[in-house]
Amino acid sequence: MKINMSYGSGGVQTSNLIHDIFLKHFNNSILNRLEDSAVLNVSGKIAYTTDSFVVTPMFFKGGDIGKLAVCGTVNDLTMMGAIPKYLTCGFILEEGTEIETVERIAESMARAAKEAKVKIVAGDTKVIEGKGGVYINTSGIGEIAVNGVSVSACKEGDAILLSGNLGEHHAAIMSERMGIQNEISSDCAPLTGILNKFIKEGIKVHFMRDVTRGGLATILNEITDSSNCGVEIEETALPISNEIRGFCDILGLDPLYMANEGKMIAVVPGKQAEKALEAMRSSVYGKNAAIIGRITEGKSVTMKTTLQGTRRIDVLYGEGLPRIC
Amino acid sequence: MKTLEQIKDELKNYDGRPVKIMEVCGTHTGSIFKHGLRCLLSPKIQLISGPGCPVCVTNAAYIDKLVDYSLQEGHCVLTFGDMMKVKGSHMSLTEAKALGGKVDILYSPLSAVKLAMDNPGTQFIFAAVGFETTTPIYALIMDELIKNNIHNLRLLTSVKTIIPALEFICENEKEIDAFLCPGHVSVIIGSDAYDSLSKKYHKPCVIAGFEGEHILGAVYEIISQIKHQSFSVKNLYTSVVSGEGNIKAQELVNQYFEVVDDDWREIGVIPGSALRLKKDYEKYDAGSLLEAYVSVGPKCCRCSDVILGRIQPVECPLFSKVCSPLNAIGPCMVSVEGACGIWYKNRG
């Protein structure tokens, strides 16, 4: 069965879609009421964010658009020191989408939400003309557990930690698009576990950011733009797998500019660097974590290369596309 | 044999005559910055960019023709990503697409054949751009087109060859002392291809891979040759480059392509510097022989002086003032392998 325009009409087929797929998988007492708005219990300060997901292909090694839609918003909340509590979810379905595909995506979202300990409490479905594409918007609310997490809190002498290998989501998506057979999987994952470890260990985290579009290089430049500090990283410290190195060499891509969906950087006081590293590494998604550099005086992002040369790291300009030769 | 530390030490403290080494290939330029090699060399060793970026040397008329095809009813241009942003006389393929032109970015050249088979109602034009590295793939595409009797995919070629370009530089640019020869191209043409060039012009030609150590080793070899006044071809990339090159690839290319003169963007016609489909395969050619060469570049842009090694990118009056990756005036700022773009991203 395929989605057609009547599934977005608000009539019986819309109702069937909601009951047979979304309520079945997202099942919770707030959503099940099917009121015009979800009524929520939150305490204290909240973080609130929204993001849209339009990835092609919808299913890829290591994840799918549904898992991405949950993890992306969960991670945006987490990076502000918030424990994610509630998500909303808007689907835009193109005519011709298999209903089975929608169900697979909903199942995947439910699994990711369960892992991240968030409830999907409200939603919306629209159907548009097209060729079977699916687009998802998620918004999320989290309760602030760590105050003052901000790029402006970075200080000279702070350590920069990266929670794992670079480039995996980007390379997995490109491999699918190019039909390249390899073992590279997307790293798509919720990162709240690392925040919980930081809280438990009393780490005074100054800044966190998930490494998504624009890659590590773009985040490091955001630090220098907004904090009046410089950044120096060490090439030898960067966790990059051999598979990703090979993939990048062939296509002329740079792991520093590639997107991840389950990696973060954390800037912590220099004195707490080792303790924060242990905390990261003790989390499921932080096993390959490393201290990759430090906050310095000045205003530029530089990398000490393996050969002890110096390379300036600039922001990403345009899209990273494979080269001719 | 010297250790890496000894080589680094000697290159940092080199105090002989000033030496200008041209890295022919844009990928080498990128690697030099990526590995932070400039600060490891004595100020007397200057590394300068060469003509080995396909996007930078493809003339404007060729891009104009691609743009025209993209806007023609029932046509679709297939291209690699880095050709999208470079302007022809009027616009780029990106701009043509925004006007409703049909342009698809290919991730794998052979997928063009599948696209043509799956869409018989569309006339596909493949932007076959590059150097000797990519030409064998275009020959493979020709094999597939003939084998499968496909007539809705044609090649618009702008395939350059590197040795005539280096000869042109040797004849016209007297300050270049040596060449860091391109690794990828050399896999196909072989190290012997540089022999006559090195002998005739007394220049070290050293082939290297793209790791920092490879490039430092090549610079060290060049400096040693200059010190001893003995100039030759040295292949430091023996794991993939042989003396004779890839014979099978050369035979495949020779089956479909012939040598012709061609225009290099803003440089002019270099004799025997390109490959074009032979007459026998004319029906697969989308009009690669351009009636008139058009080399009208943006005013004040000095991209051609950059790729001939006359100036460094920062010496162009437009560099970082009006020309930047987000507002690229010349092709060397657009391309991922273009010297100006690489210098801009590593400025400071």
Image (spheres, coloured by chain):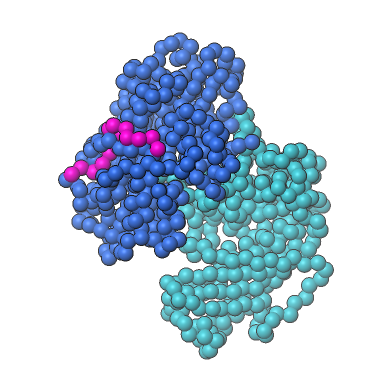
Chain colours: A cyan, B blue
Expressed as whole percent of the image width and height from the top left, the position of residue A76 reads 68, 61
Residue farthest left in this picture:
B280
Examine the image and state in which quarter residue B294 appears: top left
Specify whether B27 is left or right of A211.
Answer: left
Looking at this view, is B333 or B134 the one in front? B333
Q: Residue at x 60, y 50 (%)?
A: A215
Looking at this view, is A199 or B245 the one in front? B245
Expressed as whole percent of the image width and height from the top left, the position of residue B320 reads 58, 41
Expressed as whole percent of the image width and height from the top left, the position of residue A170 reads 53, 53
Q: Residue at x 67, y 85 (%)?
A: A35
Q: Is residue A134 visible?
A: yes
Q: Residue at x 63, y 32 (%)?
A: A310
Looking at this view, is B248 or B280 the one in front? B280
Residue farthest top in this picture:
B228
Q: Residue at x 20, y 48 (%)?
A: B282
Where's the C terminus of chain A, which quadrant? Answer: top left
Q: Is residue A182 visible?
A: no
Residue interval drawn in magenta: B266-279
Relative to B199, say whether A199 is above or below.
below
Where's the N terminus of chain A, which quadrant? Answer: bottom left
Residue farthest front in this picture:
B299
Q: Is residue B269 magenta?
A: yes
Looking at this view, is B296 or B106 the one in front? B296
Q: How many numbered markers are drawn?
A: 0
Relative to B7, say whether B149 is above or below.
below
Expressed as whole percent of the image width and height from the top left, the position of residue B329 reads 50, 45
Specify whether B303 is left or right of B291.
Answer: right
Q: Is residue B32 magenta?
A: no
Report the predominant secondary structure element of the magenta stretch: strand
